[in-house]
């Protein structure tokens, strides 16, 4: 990096840096950060700013092998020292480090932490590129890169947890460097990027986008022979190390350099900033799920898993979790994040042609045939529609092969609806949300959403009705969230309803929800109805599964059921009962223990509100 890092902290505020050794500066003077374990705690909190960090994560960072019995007490001491160092947050004088059910949360502003500033500059640079302001994009991306002072957290990497965070930061830097280099090439200034790209390719020889940018910078600088040699080296490396050929996009770039002189710029198709078109946003009321969110960020952020399935019953918060993760992963997917709903408003599945057409519009993908349903299709009729859909599918695969984007396929009805959409090559990742398990998809990483824990559900309710009202009758508040079965949608609807009915005591509303015959009627706020959402999930079930669920619904009120009780309720033998229960598990209508246990010893559960609906529909 050629320019000194930009410091943006206001006078009198501490400025922290992770992009190099861990440092803290106050008005230009470096501050002592205490012993190593204290620095590890501070580094872990700073690496996840404004996000709850579980105590277990902090413990693993400091004592990875054998934490002492006093670990929690020691952590409290280290956190207290961090509070003293940080001082109050903002003009309101709030605590910097707060402890809640999700762990310790560090409040810090963009101008006080270099990683936040880095992310902000990178996003601004990509937005400028999307507007066509390449000069502005190059300036902003370069400013982000100039914040780096060396390998991140290089003084604490003997801690596995800190080393993992440092690796993620390095991956973000590489992506921004690639953005900057490609922008400089488009501006006709390839020479400024050549040397840096060569150094990075030597350190990351299998990173294709870096190598493509290096090829382009050499080619545009008039060094065609060297550019072609870079491709030949890469092809041999891929064959030797992985037994693979370079991607179609990389091969296309090589062919263009052979045949068209200096016209080649980058792998085809060109990088497209998927219009934050709309970049997925997260809901204001999102809360809880720290473990699942962390798992999503780790799996998708490391780039090893290409498909993740988040499953759970209707109203479990799958979409909110997926959108929150997509929002936080912006820097990992430089070519954008795209969300497509897989169902219509009435809950019916959209056709493959509709989905492909929407993906094409969002990503600038066009097939070689007329759009589905277009009467002008040269083949006409159903044959023309099939040809157009096939062309869109091929174009979508080509686009994915040349880009690194995150595609959120929201509320997927079944495996068949997504199989043709998943990338066969390239670096795109797909995040699927579905009510069922989609057991026919493989290989995928699976995350099943359980009911919210009491603390998480209370936190969500408190965000909607106010912490003061929650504290006034905590027992009634707990009854409300438990009557909602820990279902995020039901808790949110309860909060919205109570926020309007300010006169209604929490205890009275809890009594209403405790009544099985009235609970679903109470869970309506404006045009948001829990019953309507559950009804949509009910329609997804096969007729036989509906009958079984209706018979098992009566067992759910007792806190769960065993296989023997299920067989008795269904009036069948053991094998038939196992198949029936496991079919409902696959459909997301019955939950089972997370750990391994025999079918007979397992305690199965039907979510309370789904059980009430099923019992009502079945007359049980």
Image (spheres, rainbow, N blue to C red):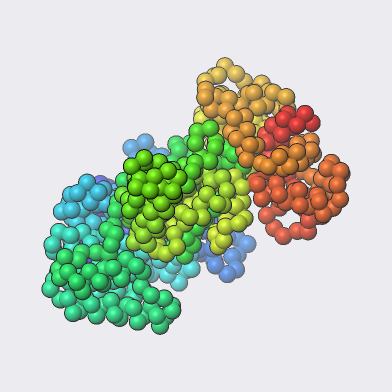
- The answer to whether 55 appears left or right of 425 in the picture is right
**Quadrant of the image occupied by residue 199:** bottom left
Q: Is residue 459 above or below residue 62?
A: above
Front-most of residues 409 and 144:
409
Front-most of residues 73 and 325:
325
Image quarter where the N terminus lies is: bottom left
Image quarter where the C terminus lies is: top right
Residue 612 seen: no
Give x and y (percent) for residue 482: 67, 35
Residue visible at 76% across and 41% down?
548
Residue visible at 15% across and 76% down?
223
Give x and y (percent) for residue 423: 44, 59
Residue visible at 51% across and 30% down?
464
Front-most of residues 456 and 268:
268
Give x and y (percent) for residue 159: 47, 68
Residue visible at 42% across and 46% down?
385
Q: How many numbered marks appear?
A: 0
- The answer to whether 403 appears left or right of 147 in the picture is right
Residue 518 seen: yes
Q: Is residue 52 above or below residue 482?
A: below
- The answer to whether 138 appears left or right of 77 in the picture is left
Give x and y (percent) for residue 485: 66, 37
> Which residue in the rendered view is the most extreme toward the top?
503
């Amino acid at each position: 990096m050629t320019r000194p890092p930009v410091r943006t902290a206001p006078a009198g505020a501490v400025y922290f840096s992770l992009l190099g050794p861990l440092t803290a500066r106050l008005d230009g003077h470096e501050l002592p950060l205490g012993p190593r374990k204290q620095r590890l705690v501070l580094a872990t909190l700073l690496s996840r700013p404004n996000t709850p960090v579980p105590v277990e994560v902090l413990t693993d960072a400091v004592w990875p092998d054998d934490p002492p019995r006093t670990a929690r007490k020691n952590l409290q001491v280290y956190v207290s020292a961090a509070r003293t160092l940080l001082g109050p947050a903002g003009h309101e004088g709030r605590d910097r480090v707060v402890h809640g059910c999700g762990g310790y949360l560090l409040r810090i502003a963009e101008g006080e932490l270099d990683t936040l500033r880095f992310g902000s500059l990178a996003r601004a640079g990509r937005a400028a590129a999307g507007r066509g302001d390449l000069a502005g994009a190059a300036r902003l991306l370069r400013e982000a890169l100039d914040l780096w002072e060396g390998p991140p957290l290089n003084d604490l990497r003997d801690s596995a947890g800190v080393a993992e965070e440092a690796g993620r930061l390095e991956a973000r830097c590489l992506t921004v460097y690639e953005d900057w280099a490609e922008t400089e090439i488009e501006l006709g200034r390839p020479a400024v990027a050549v040397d840096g790209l060569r150094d990075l390719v030597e350190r990351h020889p299998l990173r294709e986008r870096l190598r493509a940018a290096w090829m382009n910078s050499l080619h545009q600088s008039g060094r065609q022979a060297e550019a072609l040699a870079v491709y030949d080296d890469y092809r041999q490396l891929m064959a030797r190390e992985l037994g693979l050929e370079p991607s179609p996009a990389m091969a296309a770039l090589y062919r263009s350099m052979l045949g068209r002189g200096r016209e080649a710029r980058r792998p085809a198709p060109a990088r497209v900033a998927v219009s934050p078109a709309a970049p997925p946003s997260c809901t204001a009321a999102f809360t809880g799920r720290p473990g699942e969110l962390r798992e999503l960020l780790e799996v998708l952020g490391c780039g090893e898993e290409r498909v993740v399935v988040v499953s759970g019953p209707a109203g479990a918060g799958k979409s909110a979790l997926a959108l929150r993760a997509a929002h936080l992963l912006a820097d990992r997917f430089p070519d954008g994040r795209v969300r497509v709903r897989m169902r219509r408003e009435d809950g019916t599945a959209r056709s493959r042609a509709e989905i492909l057409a929407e993906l094409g519009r969002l990503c600038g993908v066009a097939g070689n045939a007329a759009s589905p349903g277009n009467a002008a299709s040269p083949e006409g009729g159903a044959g023309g529609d099939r040809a157009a859909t096939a062309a869109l599918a091929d174009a979508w695969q080509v686009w994915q092969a040349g880009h690194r984007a995150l595609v959120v396929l929201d509320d997927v009805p079944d495996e068949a609806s997504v199989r043709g959409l998943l990338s066969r090559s390239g670096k795109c990742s797909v995040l699927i949300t579905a009510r069922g398990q989609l057991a026919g998809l493989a290989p995928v990483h699976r995350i099943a959403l359980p009911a919210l824990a009491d603390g998480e559900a209370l936190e969500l309710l408190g965000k909607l009705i106010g912490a003061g009202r929650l504290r006034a009758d905590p027992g009634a508040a707990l009854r409300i969230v438990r009557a909602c079965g820990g279902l995020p949608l039901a808790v949110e609807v309860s909060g919205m309803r109570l926020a309007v009915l300010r006169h209604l005591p929490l205890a009275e509303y809890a009594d209403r929800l405790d009544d099985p015959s009235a609970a679903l009627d109470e869970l309506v706020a404006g045009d948001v109805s829990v019953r309507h959402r559950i009804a949509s999930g009910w329609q997804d079930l096969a007729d036989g599964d509906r009958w079984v669920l209706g018979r098992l619904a009566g067992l759910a009120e007792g806190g769960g059921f065993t296989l023997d009780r299920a067989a008795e309720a269904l009036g069948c033998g053991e094998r038939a009962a196992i198949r029936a229960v496991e079919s409902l598990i696959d459909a997301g209508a019955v939950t089972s223990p997370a750990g391994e246990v025999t079918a007979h010893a397992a305690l199965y559960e039907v979510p309370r509100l789904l059980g009430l609906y099923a019992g009502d529909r079945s007359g049980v």
